[in-house]
Amino acid sequence: MDLTYSDTHRALQAEIREFARTYGHLSPRSGGGRKRPDQKTLDWQRRLLERGYAARTIPREYGGYGGASDVLEAAIIADEFSRAGLSPGIMNQGISMLVPTLLEVGTEEQRRRWIAPTIRGEVIWCQGYSEPGAGSDLASAQTRAVVDDGHFVINGQKIWTSSAHYADMMFLLCRTDPDRPKHAGLSYLLVPMTTPGIDVRPLTTMTGRAEFNEVFFTDVRVPVDQIVMGRGDGWHVANITLKHERSMLGDPNRLMQRVHRIRDLMTRTRIDGVRVADMPELRDRLLRLQGEVMASRCHYLRLLTERARGEDPGVKQLIVKYFGTTLGHRLSALAVDVLGAAGLVYEPRGEAAEDDEATTWHIDYMYDIGLMIGGGTSQIQKNIIAERGLGLPREPKASARG
Ligand SMILES: Cc1cc2nc3c(=O)[nH]c(=O)nc-3n(C[C@H](O)[C@H](O)[C@H](O)COP(=O)(O)OP(=O)(O)OC[C@H]3O[C@@H](n4cnc5c(N)ncnc54)[C@H](O)[C@@H]3O)c2cc1C
């Protein structure tokens, strides 16, 4: 990994600093992101796309900037946005998970139809994987799709579907071939959420708000060309999406923004007349966490470098999700401790409550526990890293215990 800046890289750095000075006041607040993007967020996203600060490597024909994959450019953009406290753009399941999946295995028609409106934040996607009997053991999914008159007809139930209550589209894992072995009987479909027969029922979490949902399918008809790859390829496609989900969930650049926000909070906050930044115990916690975020970032850059060389980083990617989501929760716990008594005023009000700093940190603190579960639990990540990465003995299966 060569981290020396060339003249081109220094020019990019200067360009972003100028952008931050000119347009920084238009940035939406970082964090939150649990609702449909508002107009301010969409406008900001458009600006980032025009300059290639978002979707930099996505080809122009799909609405991206068409830049080459350059690790240092990616690092400079993330650094400068973090330093200036600017939103790095919309992060959601469509942009971070579906778009790279379509780039990898979608048809030309699917890429042209879906990528541009998704990266602009206009089409919101949700992920229809988990079912009441299929979470960690995702390949057990039972939602059925049978072919009838040029359509898949879907029946079944999904659960824990984030954003389904405001999403336009779902990428759905369902069973099309029940007679084949379980991993080989799945398919991956793109389903408009307005299709008749879809019933979305919000589930309230401990944040006091509905962030995910149950989704019921009754004779939902989707044209057969809305499949990604072929019948029976669903497990393969689902895993491509999961690979990107796991990188998104522990993104160290977002964690570094949190470190900066907490540093700012600690500098402004006083407890019993003492500036929190001067309290050794809390200051030590921040510095320790900052060190761990920096280590996580180096790991992330290493993965970017491998990808830019065309290598597959494999199981090493899972460390981002496992370590990053744990760090995220420890960071929001620190912020809640710093807020002290002020933090106790949290109450689950409407989406607008996220404009309140204490409320945002409390929601993050509770929501972050979910991030250690969603996209594959920490225990499952550790099992995979141990077995496939480190070559440790495989976990005994319940069925093999006799
Ligand atoms: C905030 C949040 C958002 C989510 N969003 C979505 C979404 O948008 N779309 C979607 O499809 N799903 C979503 N999920 C669901 C998520 O993917 C599942 O919750 C997760 O995969 C775990 O499945 P489960 O809940 O069925 O738990 P289970 O699989 O029943 O696991 C229960 C416990 O047992 C442990 N466990 C299970 N198997 C093993 C094993 N082999 N070894 C060791 N421990 C094991 C788990 O780690 C966990 O602690 C979301 C979940 C959360 C919390």
Image (cartoon, grey):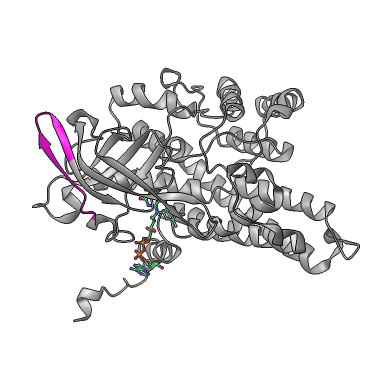
Please give the name of the residue rendered at 27% of the width and 33% of the height, measured from the top-left corner: 195
Please give the name of the residue rendered at 76% of the width and 63% of the height, measured from the top-left corner: 341
Left or right: 108 as drawn, with respect to 125? left
Residue 148 position, x and y percent, is: 9, 34
Quarter-of-image position of residue 311? top left
Left or right: 250 as drawn, with respect to 151? right
Q: Nearer the viewer, residue 290 or 170?
A: 170
Number of dots carrying numbers: 0
**Can residue 151 be found in the magenta stretch?**
yes
**Can residue 98 be found in the magenta stretch?**
no
Residue 163 position, x and y percent, is: 44, 43
- Relative to 384, say whether 250 is above or below: above
Which span of residues is magenta-colored? 141-153
Farthest residue toward the bottom?
Answer: 402
The quarter of the image that holds ligand 1 is bottom left
* Overall secondary structure of the magenta section: strand
Please give the name of the residue rendered at 60% of the width and 32% of the height, measured from the top-left corner: 73
Residue 299 position, x and y percent, is: 55, 51
Confirm whether residue 287 shows in the render. Answer: no
- Relative to 271, say whether 109 is above or below: above
Farthest residue toward the right?
Answer: 273
